[in-house]
Every structure is written in structure tokens, then in C-alpha cells.
Amino acid sequence: MDRFINNRAPRRLVLIFIIMLGISAAAAYIASGKCADIIVTAQIESELSAVGGGSFTGSPDESAVSAGEDILRKYSIRKNMPPELMHSYPHVRHTAFNALFGLMTAVSAIWLIISMREAMSLFRDLEKLRSDCIEAAYDTHASIKMYGEELGTVHRVCESAEILVDRMRNTSSRLTNEQEFLRTFLTDLSHQIKTSLAVVRLNTDMLSELNDLSVERREKLSDEIQLNLDGMEHLVIEAIKLAKLNADAVEYDMKPYSVSELFVNAVKKLSPLLRQKDIVINTALPDDIKLTCDKGWLCEAIENIIKNSADHSECTEISAELTQNPVLTTLSITDNGKGIPQDEIPKLFDRFSSKSQDRTMYSSGLGMSIAQKIVRANNGEIFVYSEPGKGTRFEFVFLTLSKNKL
């Protein structure tokens, strides 16, 4: 009853049934008149034939009918008289009308029953689908069941609802992960900044309160303040970069560039650090291999990898290799440092992964995470191969597309 009251389709079916009854009544009335005319006319001919000496059984004899007309002409009874004038006409027409209208009503009623049953079955499946959707809205583990015929509309709607629920589930999972990342990121960032702020505040208090400090001591405290301020500035800049990369707010200028040129530019920016640590680096790469990418961002990704190798691997040499085939373009950066334990490799690209047990590993801060996001945004991926005591190899792998070739 609820499905009948709250849906228009069943009420429309009933309305159509009533209209069909009206049409059936009109059609039966017209058809019953035709039938009565035929039947009563046949009765008149039979009676005239009988009066004229014919038989009541079988087809009327024309001569007998003519003879009967001659006998009854004085009573104005003839063969072509209107059938409506006969006393049996109303009864015959009423009988024919009841038979025809009853048949049409029965057919319409059967149609209504079948249609209502199918409509109610359809609404029942839709109500079940509605319940599944409501359950899935509050329970991420709930699923949508398939109702109706396999190729029917309800079944296809169920499939679409299942796709929608999967998308919603994935979106919810990604949102949860992003919230967890944001919470962890802010916690780690605030911890990093608080440490530097504590040093700055302590040194500032010492400079302002202790008047008997030597010039050398004051310069040392000032240098520590400046060093920590530089560290905080670098950290904030890196955090802003990572936030822009995570939000897909970076507009990349994708053009063909020589990979060798990108690597040389990255090494030039890190030359003071490499000289300070006495690290030899090989920049002899083929100049004819080009890649469609954003020059500035990809150069920064290469810088971050080299810088992490220089800062944390205790290496003395960093070498590079560049290869290209019809499928892939690969830039390999290898150091001869102490290597990375296998259980630490999955953590390399985590933010602030220096919280791992080995605090001297490569991934300290945000540089590795930024490098990974830049490479992925330039249609590539970073792979890491390492063993303790045997150094580490980072591979930048890009698909070799036709537009990357000149």
C-alpha cells in the first residue's frame, strides 16, 4: 500500500485501466449493435422463410422469404425492415454487449494485475537498493546487492550505485589518509621548528642578559641563531613546496630538455656542498637524450637526491648513467656510500622519516618526498636499489613517448 500511495506509476496504471474500461464499454456498445443487427436480421429472414413455407433449420430459402414477405406485407413486415423494430433486438444487443464488455474487462484486468505486479516488484527492488545505499553511506564496509534481471534497468542501476559506493569509499579512505598525513605533518613540522626556536630563544636570552660574554662567545651565539633561522626558513619553504605539490597547485611548463643539461645544472647548484664533503661526481652523460618535462622542478628533484646522498650516505663518489630505449628513459644516480637496510627503503620517501631508528638515513626532512612527487608529476617514477655497505642507486624512470623525442 505504501508503494502504491507514494508512487505515481501504480496510480497511473489504475487510471489507464479505468480509461481502458471506458474505451471497452464504448467499443462493446458499438460492436454489440453491429452484432444485434446481424443476428436480428437473420432472425427476420428465418421467420419470413417459415411463414412462406420454409424450414426453421438451415439457411433461409429466398423464395420462401419472398413468399413470407407477400403474406406479411399487410402488417408492414418485410425483409429489409430496421432490426431495431423487433422486440428481441434490445435483448440480443444487451447479451452481445455483456459478452464483449466482459471479455474486454477480463483482458484489461489481467493486464492491470500483471502490470501492478511488475511495478510492485520493481519498487520493491528499488526500496532494497535504497536501504543498501543508506547503509553504505554510514558503513564503509557495506556493499550494494544486485537486484532485478541481469540486463534489466534495476540491475544496471545497482551496478552504477556499486561504482558510486566504491568511489565514495575510495574518497573517504583518501580523505582519512590525508587527514592523518596533515596531522602527522603538522606535528613533525612544529617539532622541528620548536627545536630551532628553543635554540634561538636561549641564545637570544644569553646575549641580552649576560653582559660579560666575550666577543668570540657572542659571535658563536649569533652564528647559532643565524644557522637555526636559516634552517627554519628552509623548512618552511620546503613545507610550502610539499603542500603545493600535494594540492596539485603547481603549473608545470612541459617542454623538451636535455637530461644531461638538467643533471649538470643540479650539480652546479650543489658544488659548494660537494667540495666541502670532498665528493667526486661524474657528469659525463650523452647530450642527445631529451625528455619532455618541467626543467626547474625536475632539476630540483635531482638536487634533492644528490643532496641526500651527500649528506647521509658517507660516500666519496657519485656517478650518473643515462639510457633510453623505445619504451623507457632512465637516469641512474649511484653513490658508493654505506647503503640502506632493506627495511628502511620503504620509508625513504616519507615526510620526516628521520623518526626511524636510524636517524642518519637518506630520508630526513622533506626533500625525498618532494623529489618523488615532482618525478611522478613529470610522468615518471623513482626506484631505489641498495644493500648495506654496497652503496645505493636511485633510478628516475620515465616513459619514452614520441613527444619526448626531437
Image (cartoon, rainbow, N blue to C red):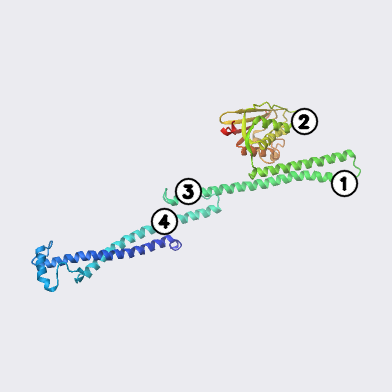
Amino acid residing under circle 1: Ser
Using the numbered discs, state the Cα–Cα distance from disc 3 to disc 1 in whole angstroms.
72 Å
Which label's residue is closer to the chain start, 1 or 2? Answer: 1
Whether residue 401 is visible: no
Q: Which residue is mark 4?
A: 121
Determine if residue 403 is in view.
Answer: yes
Quarter of the image with the N terminus is bottom left
Give the CA distance from mark 4 to mark 1.
85 Å
Residue farthest along the left direction in this orientation = 53
Real-space Cα separation, disc 3 to disc 2, in angstroms: 63 Å
Please tell me which residue is depicted at 77% across the width and 30% down the height of the picture: 276
Disc nearer the start of the sequence (4/1): 4
Q: Which residue is mark 3?
A: 159
Give me the C-alpha separation between circle 4 and circle 2: 80 Å
Q: Which residue is mark 2?
A: 276
Residue 120 percent coordinates (x, y): 41, 58
- Give SS at disc 4: helix
Residue 53 percent location from the top left of the image: 8, 66
